[in-house]
Image (cartoon, helix red, strand yellow):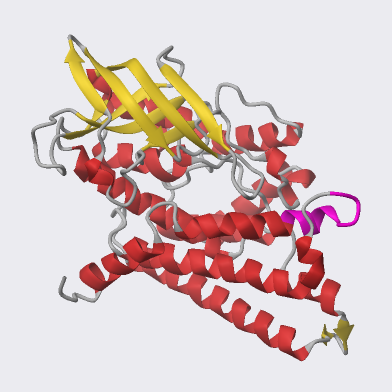
């Protein structure tokens, strides 16, 4: 392990650009894709170097674009990345959602086609799950897929399709048997967003951003070979992917890759006295939040160490998703309380860029408790699947 740590530390020293050791601006998001444009050339350099080493997806098999690291070696890699404050080299649903699902349910041909491209950041993926009227009750979805030779013809609408305006491919739930019970007759399928029948319309949010979209399908064609799992049994794949998603969203509660630490932020707005945050109430709140961060990170690590190698996440993902999103929301609530009237800024020279970013990020954090299944849904899962409480 010491030898591997030394190797990783030396490799990072030689290969991680200096600008990739700074907080990540929104316009330098390393999502990749066929239409990727990098404002900072180092973003692409960092992605390419990490992908070449297999470090964008370090625990994936080498044949799938990963490094094939053990859990212990991956922990060392993550510690060394954090030590130098390295940005993620690659982010997105390819790594956090569809990639793990393909590793578990995909055919060998699907893995060979898609996983190396995901690891290299060549394809941007989006999710086609929610529909108007089919949010928390996802299984009531109505988007249809009708057989036509070697293809399915898809018609319908999805909503809250994050990043669909930039996406190259979608993983989508469609109804292939309208007469089956609602949790049956659903198929999980992949298709290229460049099909002329796909129309994407961004949705403007209260944060001023438009990461979510409405997506419409008019006679979109998808190959039958792109069905993941069994036809009419897509709900099994869909549930597992939601667990991967919830685990990913839950990770935001660890406080990584923020513009400044809470301590630095508190000192900026409350001042410093005798080497400490001057305001005792703020100091106490920051300390409590930091302790919760540490406890949460240790719990995540213990869960990973105790899990069987390669085992998919289970109901615990709901616990991590719930606590992680609440912790992230609490962080921004605390930051706004420190800012006072400075938190009212939205635009203009009267407020700093950081103040405006924090206010907008606070608004965006509210969505964390909705996306990937609302907090209420997660609490129901925790009650039933972990605590064993009756319905």
Q: Position of residue 153 (x, y in %)?
A: 26, 16
Q: Is residue 349 magenta?
A: yes
Total numbered labels: 0
In this rendered view, identify the residue nearer to me: 329 or 294: 329
Name above or below for residue 327 compared with residue 282.
above
- 40 left or right of 272 in image: left
Is residue 199 at least partly visible in the picture? yes
Tell me what residue is drawn at x 33 percent, y 30 percent.
111
Name above or below for residue 316 compared with residue 277.
above
In this rendered view, identify the residue nearer to me: 362 or 92: 362
Q: Which residues are magenta?
A: 348-357
Tell me what residue is drawn at x 58 percent, y 36 percent.
31
Name above or below for residue 61 compared with residue 266.
above
Q: Is residue 63 magenta?
A: no
Please, which residue is most extreme toward the front here?
A: 133
Tell me what residue is drawn at x 68 percent, y 80 percent.
286
Q: Position of residue 245 (x, y in %)?
A: 40, 50
Q: Position of residue 42 (x, y in %)?
A: 74, 35
Q: Position of residue 243 (x, y in %)?
A: 33, 53
Is residue 167 at least partly visible in the picture? no
- 350 left or right of 194 in image: right
């Amino acid at each position: 392990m010491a030898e591997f740590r030394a190797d990783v530390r030396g490799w990072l020293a030689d290969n991680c650009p200096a600008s990739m050791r700074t907080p990540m601006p929104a316009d330098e998001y390393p999502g990749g894709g066929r239409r990727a444009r990098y404002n900072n050339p180092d973003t692409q350099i960092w992605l390419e170097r990490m992908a070449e080493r297999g470090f964008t997806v370090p625990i994936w098999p080498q044949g799938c674009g990963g490094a094939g690291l053990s859990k212990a070696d991956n922990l060392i890699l993550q510690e060394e990345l954090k030590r130098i404050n390295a940005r993620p080299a690659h982010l997105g649903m390819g790594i956090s959602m569809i990639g793990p699902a393909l590793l578990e349910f995909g055919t060998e041909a699907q893995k060979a086609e898609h996983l190396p491209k995901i690891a290299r950041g060549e394809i941007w993926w989006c999710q086609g799950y929610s529909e108007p009227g089919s949010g928390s009750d996802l299984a009531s979805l109505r988007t249809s897929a009708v057989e036509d030779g070697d293809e399915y013809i898809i018609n319908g609408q999805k909503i809250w399709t994050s990043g669909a305006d930039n996406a190259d491919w979608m993983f989508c739930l469609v109804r292939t048997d309208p007469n089956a019970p609602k949790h049956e007759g659903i198929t999980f399928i992949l298709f290229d967003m460049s099909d002329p029948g796909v129309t994407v319309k961004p949705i403007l949010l209260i944060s001023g951003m438009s990461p979510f979209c409405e997506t419409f399908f008019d006679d979109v064609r998808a190959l039958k070979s792109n069905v993941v799992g069994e036809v009419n049994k897509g709900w099994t794949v869909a549930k597992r992917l939601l667990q991967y998603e919830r685990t990913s969203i839950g990770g935001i509660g660890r406080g990584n890759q923020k513009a400044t630490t809470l301590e630095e932020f508190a000192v900026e707005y409350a001042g410093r006295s005798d080497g400490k945050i001057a305001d005792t109430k703020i100091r106490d709140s920051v300390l409590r939040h930091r302790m919760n961060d540490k406890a949460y990170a240790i719990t995540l690590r213990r869960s990973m160490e105790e899990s069987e190698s390669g085992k998919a996440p289970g109901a615990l993902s709901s616990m991590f998703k719930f606590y992680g999103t609440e912790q992230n929301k609490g962080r921004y609530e605390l930051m706004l309380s420190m800012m006072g009237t400075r938190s009212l800024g939205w635009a203009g020279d009267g407020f700093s860029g950081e103040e405006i970013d924090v206010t907008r990020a606070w608004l965006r954090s509210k969505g964390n408790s909705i996306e990937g299944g609302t907090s209420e849904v997660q609490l129901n899962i925790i009650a039933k699947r972990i605590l064993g409480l009756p319905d």
